[in-house]
């Protein structure tokens, strides 16, 4: 019965699958499919997240965009500039940020399909976007625009350009490889593993002699160096802040701590890929010999794919052992672009048109069901509560701004408090302030004593956060602070309400 229903839906999708299999139409069909994917997940994201406010990590990039620099305490600077550009076109709203996130991962699926198409054709290439669309990195996690999700299209673009450069040695592909690799590195230093994979692949490829004798690798390296050099200078001048951040936050406290991290890194990555793996096994029925030939192919044609897939996944384990650093599976968001090649590129794996139609039907049904339950997700988040006070950020922003403008005629330029609360709250404030997050000079180097004296500052704390309240008291002692108030906030959504929560607000008017 279920198989019959899938086949009926598969027939309805036959035109899409046929277009994906057609050598002349597959790019156009893939683009249309990706646009439909983006529309579905945009709808889900807007509805499911409508009972909460913007994620603090996303909001932090908006703060960075207000304090443009060549580097930041946690990460390289590229995404701050991307956000600055995006919101010069779109309004500063939740839906516009969701659109950026969905556009990013959708571009990732399209570029990954182009990449996988270097080894796959026909029905196998047609299966690629559907296999990627069931990996949470491209869906649920992709709704959070951050350094990990932004790497998905950048890694795919880098690998795609690199393979063309390796094959043709043309200047355009070489320059694009260097530029895309630099963009990836300027997004997150995790991309260093991608660079190693590229170098490793060139050394073991059958074309290595002619490639290294050409201008291609030197052009790639030159473009990369020129693009990253300003940030490197900033790193040296500021004593490598992002590296210090990682070493203090991700250092393993013991061997058991590291082993626990390694287990999460390995099992977590496998778990995120599990649905795609399961569908591949059920629909394509690869034999054991086919599986061995798929995942560890070292014959000349598929050897680059094997090296480019496994190196960024396995090399971090070696580095983590040496540096005693904990790993996180979410950092592998960009590393699964080549997984369809690993699963089905082997000639021993047979992929029929019927199997691809069934795969398309399953992905379509799952996507429609996910969109359908999005209001229930929003309601559950409202009632259960969301971590980091995410239900109250916009309400807190209103309360803080109201109190500020009752005590000062100046625009609000700085707001202090817990990182997660003030980052999100600042996103909603009309004066577009920067933050003094966690009262940390490291996280907010722009919040200098001179600036606080000149611009003043609002401070907000959850009423039950003793550490924040103590920092608030210390900060306002001896300052001409405005009155201290406590507000109780409740989130309303379609007639439903969240739990109420209290916050304390103090203002420090400008002294200059």
Image (cartoon, rainbow, N blue to C red):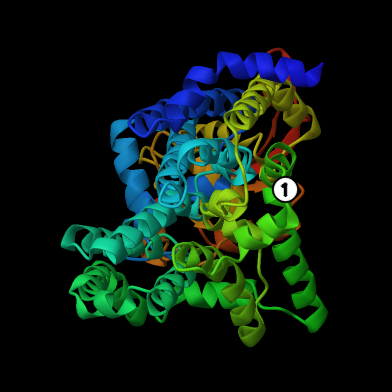
Q: Is residue 127 above or below residue 455?
A: above
- The image shows residue 324, relative to residue 249, as above or below, that is below
**Tag count:** 1
- In depth, the one of 441 and 112 nearer the eye is 112
Relative to the observer, which residue lies in front, 445 or 386?
Answer: 386
| Residue 94 image offset from top left, x and y in percent | 49, 31
Q: Position of residue 370 (x, y in %)?
A: 68, 25
Residue 323 horizontal/vertical position (percent): 61, 84
Is residue 223 depicted above or below 276 in this figure? below
Categorize mark 1 by other alpha carbons within 10 Å: few (<14), some (14-19), many (20+). Answer: some
Which residue lies most toward the bottom here? 322
Where the N terminus falls, by quadrant? top right
Q: Secondary structure at mark 1?
A: helix
The residue lying at 35 percent from left, 60 percent from top is: 163
Is residue 35 visible from the viewing direction of this image? no
Residue 224 in sight here: yes
- Residue 339: x percent and y percent? 57, 53
The quadrant of the rendering that contains the C terminus is bottom left
Find residue 328 and report its image quarter. bottom right
Q: Residue at x 69, y 47 (%)?
A: 277
In this rendered view, identify the residue nearer to me: 278 or 219.
Answer: 278
Label 1 sits on residue? 274
Occupied quadrant, residue 438 = bottom right
Is 30 left or right of 392, judged from the image as shown? left
260 left or right, relative to 119: right
Dividing the picture into quarters, in which one does residue 237 lie? bottom left
Name which residue lies at 40% across and 74% down: 205
Q: Is residue 262 left or right of residue 482?
A: right
């Amino acid at each position: 019965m279920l198989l019959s229903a899938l086949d009926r839906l598969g027939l309805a999708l036959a035109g899409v699958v046929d277009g994906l299999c057609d050598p002349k139409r597959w790019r156009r069909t893939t683009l249309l499919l990706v646009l439909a994917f983006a529309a579905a997940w945009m709808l889900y994201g807007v509805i499911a997240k409508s009972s909460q406010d913007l994620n603090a990590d996303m909001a932090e990039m908006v703060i960075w965009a207000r304090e443009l620099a060549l580097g930041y305490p946690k990460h390289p600077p590229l995404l701050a500039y991307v956000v600055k550009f995006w919101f010069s076109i779109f309004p500063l709203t939740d839906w516009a940020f969701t659109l950026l996130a969905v556009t990013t991962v959708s571009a990732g699926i399209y570029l990954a399909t182009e990449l996988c198409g270097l080894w796959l054709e026909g029905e196998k290439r047609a299966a690629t976007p559907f296999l990627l669309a069931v990996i949470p990195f491209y869906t649920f996690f992709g709704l959070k625009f951050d350094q990990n999700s932004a790497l998905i299209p950048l890694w795919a673009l880098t690998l795609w350009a690199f393979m063309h450069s390796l094959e043709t040695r043309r200047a355009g592909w070489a320059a694009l490889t260097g530029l895309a690799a630099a963009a990836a590195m300027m997004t997150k230093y995790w991309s260093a593993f991608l660079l190693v994979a590229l170098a490793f692949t060139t050394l073991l490829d059958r074309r290595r002699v002619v490639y290294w004798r050409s201008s291609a690798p030197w052009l790639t390296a030159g473009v990369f160096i020129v693009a990253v050099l300003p940030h490197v200078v900033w790193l040296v001048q500021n004593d490598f802040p992002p590296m210090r951040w990682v070493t203090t936050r991700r250092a393993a406290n013991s061997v058991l701590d590291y082993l626990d991290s390694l287990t999460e890194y390995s099992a977590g990555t496998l778990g995120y890929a599990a649905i795609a793996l399961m569908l591949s096994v059920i629909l394509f029925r690869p034999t054991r010999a086919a599986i061995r030939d798929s995942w560890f192919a070292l014959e000349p044609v598929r050897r680059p794919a094997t090296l480019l897939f496994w190196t960024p996944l396995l090399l971090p384990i070696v580095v983590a052992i040496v540096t005693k650093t904990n790993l996180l599976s979410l950092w592998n968001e960009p590393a699964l672009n080549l997984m369809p090649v690993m699963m089905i590129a082997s000639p021993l794996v047979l992929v029929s048109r019927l199997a691809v139609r069934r795969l398309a039907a399953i992905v379509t049904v799952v996507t429609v069901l996910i969109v359908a339950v999005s209001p229930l997700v929003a309601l559950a988040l409202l009632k259960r509560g969301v971590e980091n006070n995410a239900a109250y950020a916009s309400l807190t922003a209103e309360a803080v701004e109201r109190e500020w403008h009752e005590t000062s005629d100046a625009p609000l330029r700085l707001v202090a408090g817990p990182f997660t609360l003030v980052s999100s709250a600042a996103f909603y404030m009309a004066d577009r302030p920067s933050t003094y997050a966690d009262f940390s000079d490291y996280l907010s180097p722009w919040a200098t004593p001179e600036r606080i004296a000149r611009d003043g500052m609002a401070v907000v704390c959850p009423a039950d956060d003793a550490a924040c309240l103590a920092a608030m008291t210390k900060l306002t002692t001896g300052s001409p602070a405005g009155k201290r108030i406590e507000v109780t906030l409740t989130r309303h959504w379609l007639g439903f309400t969240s739990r109420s929560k209290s916050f304390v607000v103090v203002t420090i008017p400008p002294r200059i």
